């Protein structure tokens, strides 16, 4: 059995390779470069070279062959172009999930197989289990603080059949300890951050490579808006009925507020000693215009940093973006009603079951624990499968449900049965 380890230069993949070597496996390492451009990145243009250097030293220390492969072209096509398209549509993608599905366990796996590999191993904190029927399932990693199963939520059975996760049963401190005991060059290396293989980025600058910057209004929404909103009242009425809802009602409930009914009227007034005529917005009990932005597509629901808005006692968050009218709506405070929702929808063609045998049928409902972003504590919810899609109805309101992100659900024993892209 020949195993290719995706060696990134980090401590996790290094220990994965070391463990496999200690077990007597026929192991070789391969480092992939997936990104060349530095526009919008915050680390400069040498980070990947440093990572490769460390990875090569680790391979030498362990005593395994080392290979290098450039997958930047396919990475741009399958991951980065997808990112640009999603942001242009007003959705917020998760490139790390796509990277695993389209690169590590697709393009990288194919390259490893050409070198004779039977399996690809990575340093993910998750567990894989083979079942009697020949299928595989993914479970949460043993370390609750580092579980990375979320990032593997789009893998299929063919990919899982070739995947190994050697550190899935370990906790991070144990991985660090093993690395130090083995004197691996990556033992003290900090964990990577930012977009997979791109790194930390100034997102607007990064996206401006393809998306045009156009100024628009920042509108702050007040609590009075929700007191007067027919949509907000209707949602509360539907939620009070629990899961006894029609397809049409679930679709209605999962549709977020769009704030298109907020309009501003202007008035003229004279200002200063010379009575210069100026224009201002009339007072609006629902909202006010409080600033300008560089393009609604550069912002994401729940975003707090980078808004450039002051004068508030509490933090200000993005509630919604209107791509067509180029407006972003914001609200003050973590408990702002515009941040909280209990229902989301996944379109039929964006539902993914890791084990197809577990797929829900129209009319069926199940209880699962769900997360809508990495590291979010699991939330109790009911999944309702309907002809119009899969609806997730949470027991408690969720902050910043974001279209384009992945909702992932888990069984009580830690298995991750499936996932899907949150719809607009």
Image (cartoon, rainbow, N blue to C red):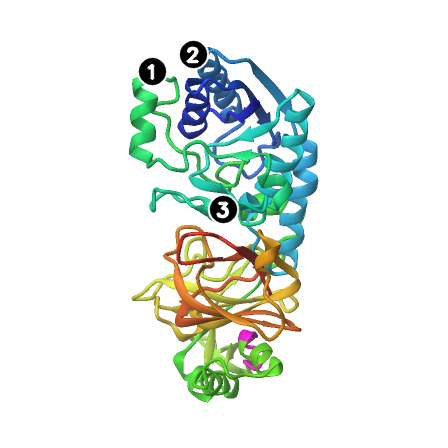
SS at mark 3?
strand
Picture residue at 34% right of the left edge, 17% below the top: 182
Name the residue rendered at 42%, 63% in the picture: 317
User: Where in the figure is residue 12, as x and y percent of width and height?
Assistant: 41, 30
Q: Secondary structure at mark 1?
A: loop
Mark 1 and mark 2 residues within 8 Å of each other at the beta carbon: yes
Instruction: Between residue 253 and residue 204, name the one nearer to us.
Output: 253
The residue beneath circle 2 is 61
Label 3 crowd (10 A; few <14 / some 14-19 / many >=20): many
Q: Which residue is mark 3?
A: 138
Q: Is residue 312 visible?
A: yes
Disc 2 packing (10 Å; few <14; some 14–19; many ≥20): some
Residue 111 included in the magenta stretch of the image: no
Q: CA distance from mark 1 to mark 2?
A: 8 Å
Which stretch appears magenta?
254-262
Quarter residue 381 falls in: bottom left
Mark closer to the observer (1, 3): 3
């Amino acid at each position: 059995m020949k195993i290719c380890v995706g060696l990134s230069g980090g401590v996790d993949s290094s220990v994965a390779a070391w463990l496999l070597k200690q077990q007597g496996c026929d192991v070789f390492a391969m480092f992939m470069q997936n990104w060349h451009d530095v526009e919008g990145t915050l680390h400069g243009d040498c980070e990947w070279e440093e990572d490769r250097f460390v990875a090569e030293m680790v391979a030498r220390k362990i005593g395994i062959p080392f290979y290098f492969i450039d997958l930047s072209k396919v990475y741009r096509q399958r991951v980065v172009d997808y990112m640009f398209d999603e942001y242009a549509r007003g959705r917020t993608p998760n490139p790390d999930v796509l990277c695993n599905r389209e690169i590590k366990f697709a393009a990288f796996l194919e390259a490893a197989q050409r070198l004779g590999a039977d399996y690809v191993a990575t340093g993910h904190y998750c567990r894989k289990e083979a079942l009697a029927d020949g299928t595989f399932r993914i479970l949460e990693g043993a370390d609750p603080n580092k579980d990375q199963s979320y990032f593997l939520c789009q893998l299929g059975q063919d990919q899982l059949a070739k995947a190994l996760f050697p550190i899935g049963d370990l906790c991070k401190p144990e991985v660090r300890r093993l690395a130090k005991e083995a004197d691996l060059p990556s033992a003290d290396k900090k964990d990577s951050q930012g977009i997979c293989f791109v790194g930390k980025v100034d997102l607007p600058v990064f996206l401006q490579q393809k998306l045009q910057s156009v100024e628009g209004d920042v509108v702050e929404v007040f609590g009075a808006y929700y007191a007067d909103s027919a949509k907000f009242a209707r949602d509360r009425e539907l939620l009070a009925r629990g899961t006894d809802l029609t397809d049409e009602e679930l679709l209605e409930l999962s549709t977020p507020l769009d704030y298109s009914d907020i309009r501003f009227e202007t008035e003229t007034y004279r200002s200063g000693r010379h009575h210069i005529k100026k224009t201002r917005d009339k007072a609006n009990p629902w909202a006010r215009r409080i600033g300008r932005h560089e393009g609604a597509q550069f912002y994401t629901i729940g975003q707090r940093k980078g808004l450039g808005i002051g004068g508030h006692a509490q933090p200000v968050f993005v509630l919604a973006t209107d791509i067509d009218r180029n407006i972003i709506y914001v609200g003050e405070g973590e408990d702002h009603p515009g941040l909280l929702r209990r229902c989301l929808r996944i379109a039929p063609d964006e539902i993914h079951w890791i084990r197809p045998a577990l797929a829900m049928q129209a009319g069926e409902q199940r209880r699962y624990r769900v997360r809508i972003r990495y590291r979010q504590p699991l939330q109790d919810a009911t999944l309702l499968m309907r002809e119009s899609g899969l609806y997730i109805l949470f027991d408690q309101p969720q902050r910043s449900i974001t279209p384009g992100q992945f909702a992932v659900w888990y069984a009580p024993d830690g298995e991750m049965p499936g996932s899907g892209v949150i719809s607009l």
